[in-house]
Amino acid sequence: MKILFKQLFLIAFTIVLFSACSEDDDPKITVDISDLELLHEEVTDTDLIVQVYSNEQAFSGYNQLYFLLKKASDNMLIENATITIMPMMDMTEHSHSAPTIQPYVSEERRGLQQGAVIFTMPSGDMGKWTLSVKVAGLENGQEIAFDFEVPVISKEATYQAQDVKYQTLFKKVINNQRYFFAYHLPEGKPAIGVNDFEVYVYKQLDMMTYEAVDGLTISIEPEMPSMGHGSPNNVDPIGKGNGRYAGSVNFSMSGDWAIWLTIAQGGEVVLTDAAFYLEF
């Protein structure tokens, strides 16, 4: 009886272990994209489908992008490919790119790669944005490349409290060089209370090249223009590398908010008259 019990136990344990391993290794894992917006789907002639998602319609500012790769024949996910992206604003007389975070395997969303583009201006009469995507490291050394248009909107709006604009990014010249500043709320939309808050800083080297800027000291001061007060318990963003500075901002109530920045470089204050504006 004891021998039979041990045999049954070993069989059951083996089945559970095999099932767990199979679930972890199954390339047909479920990917949750229900809260994302599809920007583009590319169906190739190499049995590959590439889908590009974002949290919302693309806008001038920091845009988180997600990439889903799968085989057209059986919907099996492809997670080990290398994705490279290049945004381009095509204007009448010239073209330029934008600050970019190249895609990497997402820890937040299994089965996806994530990256970002800081679109520096909206689409319009002056020009349009396209995003070039290259996928390498596929089976048999295959590579594919494609591009698609990305309509980029502006979120600017004038407040009643004062003549200011909603800004998801701003540009400033510091020591004869052009800097771009954009903010990002990792948790999504702003909410009453303490919100994780990130600032991304890039320096433009030329029309096609942007360099992440580290080593800055950033202080923030939220203000509600329509009410004339600020908020306590804010945490100044601290450098995390690759141009990203992470802190937190406290919105004590809904409404219009300005997040004023004081920025120092090398112990010297280089910027005091800039703010992000948002309303919720």
Image: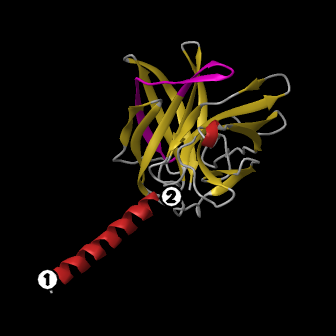
Magenta span: predominant SS is strand
Name the one closer to the observer, 8 or 117: 8
The residue wearing badge 1 is: 2
Q: Quick check: is 213 in the magenta stretch?
A: yes
Task: Judge from the rendering whether residue 32 lies leftward or rightward of residue 16; answer left or right.
Answer: right
Q: Secondary structure at mark 1?
A: helix
Q: Amino acid at mark 1?
A: Lys
Label 2, label 1: how many angstroms apart (C-alpha)?
A: 67 Å
Q: Is residue 262 above or below residue 33?
A: above
Image quarter in which the N terminus is found: bottom left
User: Is residue 167 among what the camera can see?
Assistant: no
Q: Secondary structure at mark 2?
A: loop
Which residue: 54% across, 27% down? 202
Task: Judge from the rendering whether residue 19 lies leftward or rightward of residue 3; answer left or right.
Answer: right
Q: Quadrant of residue 119?
A: top right
Q: Amino acid at mark 2?
A: Ser
Name the one closer to the observer, 54 or 141: 141
